[in-house]
């Protein structure tokens, strides 16, 4: 865990990701693991005075409640370099100052990242250098394959860390713990007992000033193609013998290879919608297309749903419904498992109104089990009662978990190249159907639960 001499070189250090997520995440990592040493070098084409950078680092670390002495030591060790990551000489010089144990974090626009990787192939990186990349990994299957091939010409796969910060969310890894460490759940984790699974990430947040990013990213790609399919992979994979990264990632890739749009028909399998004006709590939310920075011609959805099937013996016939929406009336971030009816309920009992359910709540973390039982009154009248366990606060921010793993060289919480390609393979037919107008764009009022009838 202690890593005395690693340099974390952040390319794109004056951008949003670094300020809002990376540095605060690093702060919580250093708070939780006081023995860890890391030198942070920020690089970006924007001019930033050394003091301004140090202040930025200091603020981010301060947010994590690190003690003053620690913050001062880290801040005195950090530096900022103005450099164009596409300039061969500037990059060569920059890498020359970073030492042997190096993590290069690409906090750059995706198109720039691709070009920088090509440049790194040319100029070379110190042996053992790790590359940390943000999604999107390519813009379709073909470009994801090209990017993977390019990366492998720079470093081996074991030194490539494709980041999905959802994998640093403690409640996601909890899915694996709950599944495999519980005698009551392990044997019933299959189509024989599970009728349907819904993986939902709905939020009340609307655009919140990020139209420039969001209108191009859209939910199918920003949420389902990455985070929700990754959750599905953890949920549906076969049992690993150990939590070794290669083993777990191979099992996840296997689950993703079995995944297809429902009935192999992207039109039946998918739905999309966009919000119109409405009210969420005390806020008035304007029509999505009226927001500044939105181009209606792009037909960006603000609610996407994709149902997939896993074509293997464990999951045959079970629909997995992946859904993510913005400006929805209520936050709902959970995995909901609907169990099949029992084969027989003794005559004389009045059956419950719904199926038994297991709910794995992602944020805030909780696990709930809805079981049929007699709670009060007539003992033959069954109803659903909920058993709930609330999970504790995560020890650090998701980016702290992810950065810690990268600094340790452990890729468990990152995405392997073949997984990244599978994620594209699954959604590409859906994207094509949407582009051809085969799936209508429904509407829902901001603050509602989504379009009527969904
Ligand atoms: P920003 O545009 O805010 O930051 C990128 C930074 O890179 C900018 O400062 C930009 O400078 C700089 N840059 C661009 N080209 C070069 C270059 N040739 N040499 C040096 N610096 C350069 O983007 P984000 O921080 O939002 O995103 C970075 C990556 O992280 C993207 O891949 C994104 O998809 C991913 N990501 C972002 C999240 C977020 O919440 N922000 C969340 C998850 C992933 P300039 O301003 O001059 O263009």
Image: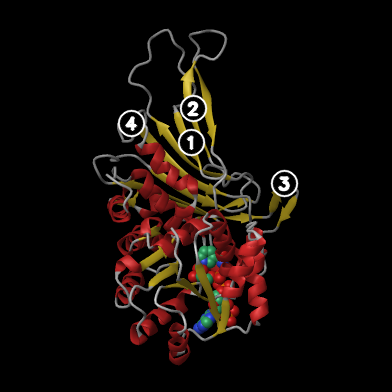
Residue at position x 64%, y 81% from top?
Answer: 50
Give the side of residue 164 with respect to residue 419, left or right.
right
Tell how many labels: 4
Q: From the viewer's side, name the closer residue of 354 and 237.
A: 237
Residue at numbered disc 3:
281
Q: Position of residue 425 (x, y in %)?
A: 33, 61
What is the CA distance from the residue labelled 3 to the residue labelled 1?
25 Å
Whichever of callouts 4 and 2 sits on the residue coming sooner in the sequence is: 4
Whichever of callouts 3 and 4 sits on the residue coming sooner in the sequence is: 4
> Residues at badges 2 and 3 in contact (C-beta under 8 Å)?
no
What is the CA distance from the residue labelled 2 to the residue labelled 3?
29 Å
Of the two numbered discs 3 and 1 in the rendering, the one whose residue sits closer to the viewer: 1
Whichever of callouts 3 and 1 sits on the residue coming sooner in the sequence is: 3
Residue 293: which quarter of the image?
bottom right
Q: Specify few, some or many for label 2: CA neighbours under 10 Å numbering under 14, 14-19, or 20 or more.
A: some
Residue at numbered disc 2:
370
């Amino acid at each position: 865990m202690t890593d005395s001499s690693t340099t974390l070189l952040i390319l794109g250090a004056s951008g949003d990701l670094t300020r809002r997520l990376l540095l605060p995440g690093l702060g919580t990592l250093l708070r939780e693991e006081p023995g860890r040493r890391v030198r942070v070098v920020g690089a970006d084409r924007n001019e930033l005075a050394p003091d301004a950078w140090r202040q930025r680092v200091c603020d981010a670390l301060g947010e994590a409640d690190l003690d003053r002495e620690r913050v001062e030591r880290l801040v005195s060790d950090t530096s900022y370099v103005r450099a164009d990551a596409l300039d061969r000489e500037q990059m060569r010089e920059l890498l020359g100052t970073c030492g042997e144990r190096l993590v290069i974090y690409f906090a750059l626009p995706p198109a720039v990242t691709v070009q920088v990787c090509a440049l790194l192939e040319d100029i070379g990186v110190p042996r053992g250098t790790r590359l940390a990349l943000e999604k999107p990994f390519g813009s379709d299957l073909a470009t994801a394959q090209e990017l993977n091939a390019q990366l492998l010409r720079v470093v081996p796969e074991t030194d490539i860390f494709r980041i999905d910060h959802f994998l640093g969310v403690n409640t996601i890894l909890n899915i694996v713990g709950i599944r495999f460490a519980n005698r009551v759940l392990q044997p019933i984790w299959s189509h024989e007992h599970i009728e349907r699974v819904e993986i939902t990430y709905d939020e009340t947040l609307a655009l919140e000033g990020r139209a420039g990013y969001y209108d191009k990213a859209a939910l199918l790609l920003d949420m389902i193609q990455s985070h929700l399919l990754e959750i599905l992979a953890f949920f549906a994979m076969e049992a690993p013998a150990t939590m070794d990264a290669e083993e777990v990632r191979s099992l996840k890739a296997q689950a993703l290879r079995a995944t297809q749009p429902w009935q192999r028909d992207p039109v039946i399998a998918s739905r999309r919608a966009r919000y119109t004006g409405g009210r969420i709590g005390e806020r008035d939310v304007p029509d999505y297309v009226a927001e500044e920075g939105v181009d209606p011609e792009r037909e960006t959805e603000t609610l996407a749903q994709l149902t997939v099937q896993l074509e293997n013996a464990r999951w045959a016939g079970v629909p997995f419904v992946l859904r993510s929406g913005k400006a929805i009336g209520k936050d709902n971030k959970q995995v909901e498992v609907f169990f099949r009816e029992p084969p027989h309920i003794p005559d004389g009992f009045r059956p419950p109104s719904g199926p038994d359910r297991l709910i794995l709540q992602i944020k805030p973390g909780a696990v709930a089990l809805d079981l049929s039982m007699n709670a009060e009154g007539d003992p033959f009248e069954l109803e659903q009662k909920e058993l709930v366990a609330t999970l504790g606060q995560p020890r650090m921010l998701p980016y702290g978990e992810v950065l810690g793993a990268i600094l340790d060289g452990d890729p468990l919480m990152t995405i392997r190249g073949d997984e990244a390609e599978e994620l594209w393979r699954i959604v590409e037919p859906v994207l094509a159907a949407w582009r051809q107008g085969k799936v209508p764009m429904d509407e829902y009022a901001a603050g509602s639960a989504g379009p009527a009838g969904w």
